[in-house]
Each structure stands twice: as C-alpha cells, then as structure tokens.
Amino acid sequence: MAPASNATTVNAANNASTSASANNGTTMAPASNGTTAAPVNVPALETEFTRQECGSTKLCADEPSSCDPTTGDNCFFLSARQQSGQTFNFELSGQSSGYIAAGVSTAASQAGRHRAYICANNNGAVRFFTGFLNNLELNTTETLDSSNQQGTVKNGKIRCRFTAVLPDTSTRASAQYSLSITTGPYNASSGQLGTPSFKVLTPLTNISDPTANITNLLANNGTTSSAYVVTPSHSFLPALLVTVCMLAFTAM
C-alpha cells in the first residue's frame, strides 16, 4: 500500500518482487512468500496529537507515566483508538535519532512475536516500515496491512500516526493485546534498521476499551519484562537443603 504523494511501483516475477520507490531508488529484498513494497517517506502530520483524549476516546501507553507527546522531550507515547472491528488508529511519538516502533502482540514479553509499525528518521523525514519483531530481531520482509501513514521529525523527536488492521480476535472475548514501544538506530543510506530496545511494554489489555487500566511493565525494572519462571530447581532447592540439614542434626 503506497502512502499519498509517494509513487511506488511493484514488479512481481516468479513469486518474488523488487520495489522501486520514487525519489530514492531504494530496493528491498523480497519476501519468500509473495510481493512486498519498499518503505517510502510519508506525508507530514496534518494535525498534532496530544494525550488530551487518553482514557476517554483512546487508550494510551507512555513512559514516563502520563507524559505529553507535545511537550515532553523524553516522552515515549503510544495511543490506540478503535475505528471499527479490527481496524485501529495509532499515534506514536518518541525521541530518537534512528527509529521508533509501535508493537502489538498477544504475549506480554520482549521475547514474544510483535507486529511492528516502524517510523524512522530518514534525513529529517519519516520513513514508514512494517514487519515483525521476534525475540528482539526485526524482520521487515513481511508487510502488514496499514494505511493513512503520516509523520514528522522535529528536534530529534519522531511523531507519526497510522491505521492498522489487526488479526481477527473473534475466538477471544475481547481484543486482548500487549502494546510496546521500541527504539533503535537507523542507517538512512542503507535503509538498515538496528537492534531495538524496549521502552514500553504493557500487560495484555483490551485495547478497544479506552478506559482500561494500563501500565508499563518495564517502569520498575529497566528493560527486563519477562517474569521469573518458578521451576523445581529454583523453588524447592532451598527447602530441600533445610530439610537435609535438620535430618542430619536430628541424627547426631
């Protein structure tokens, strides 16, 4: 899907494709399962967005908590507003000289598989990518259904909005997803996206409910979000050692 004012031509042959983007001649390696389009610069934001409607018409995740994307220099902000069915409007903002990405996943873990919507600082303009973030590795050879992309870079802050169609959740009671914000380096010359770092990761939440209680799982423990897994070796070893010592003492 090509954003406005950016013509993209896709030539597919033998189940593979090369996409040529106007104004930059950048090519992108084809996905192994079909035709994909090269990312292109997107139009500038037509209107600014704030956190004013958070909790009323849109669900918001941020770090630091309750920061404002229009004023906070170190504010990482993501909002989701249900348009209809599985179609959602997103707003994303964060300080980065490379890229910021909005993630949507059915697992609240950094090591999980996240649908990634990426806004990169391409020499002062925003270049939009989609793909998957899986176990801290970005893969942009698989494109996602998105539209209405807009973005602006100002004073080192990337701000963008887009519309995305998420997978059907009819088998679940509600649209339960974990939202995330990641950031990383971007090479504008090669188009290479660097290793992402998580800034925000939320619990599974009904993102269609703007009043849902949402927190950042990373707020108190840096960049580690995975819960400690209790295994027999961890949970019973101390008790076993105490029991052995007591038995030894009794036998004396």
Image (tube, rainbow, N blue to C red):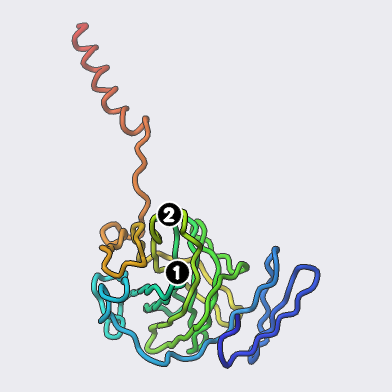
x, y percentage for residue 69?
A: 31, 81
Tell me if mark 1 has few (under 14), some (14-19) or many (20+) residues whose alpha carbon lies within 10 angstroms of its own.
Answer: few
- Quadrant occupied by the N terminus: bottom right
In this rendering, the answer to whether 243 lies above or below 237 is above
Kind of residue indicated by mark 2: Arg
Residue, x 72% and y 77% (percent of image)? 18
Q: Quadrant of residue 178?
A: bottom left
Give the camera-side residue of 198 and 162.
162
Name which residue lies at 71% across and 80% down.
10
Q: How many marks?
A: 2
Q: Secondary structure at mark 2?
A: loop
Instruction: Provide residue 251's location: percent of width, then percent of height.
Output: 22, 6
- Residue 203: horizontal and vertical position, in percent? 34, 57
**Residue for point 24% across, 22% down:** 242
Q: Nearer the viewer, residue 248 or 219?
A: 219
Q: Which residue is mark 1?
A: 85
- Dot 2 or dot 1: first in sequence order is 1
Relative side of 10 to 116, left or right? right
Q: Tag 2: Cα neighbours inside 10 Å, few (<14), some, or many (≥20)?
A: few
Q: If the image is split into quadrants, where does the C terminus sit? A: top left
Q: Name the mark on residue 133.
A: none
Q: Write down the residue under mark 2.
A: 172
Closest to the observer, 98 or 146:
146
- Callout 1, which amino acid? Gly
Q: Position of residue 90 (x, y in %)?
A: 41, 76
Which residue: 68% across, 67% down? 31
Dots 2, 1 in contact, CB < 8 A: no
Query: Disc 1 on helix, strand or loop?
Result: loop
What separation in Å lies between label 2 and label 1 (alpha carbons)?
A: 13 Å
Question: Which one is nearer the viewer's eye here, 84 or 23?
Answer: 84
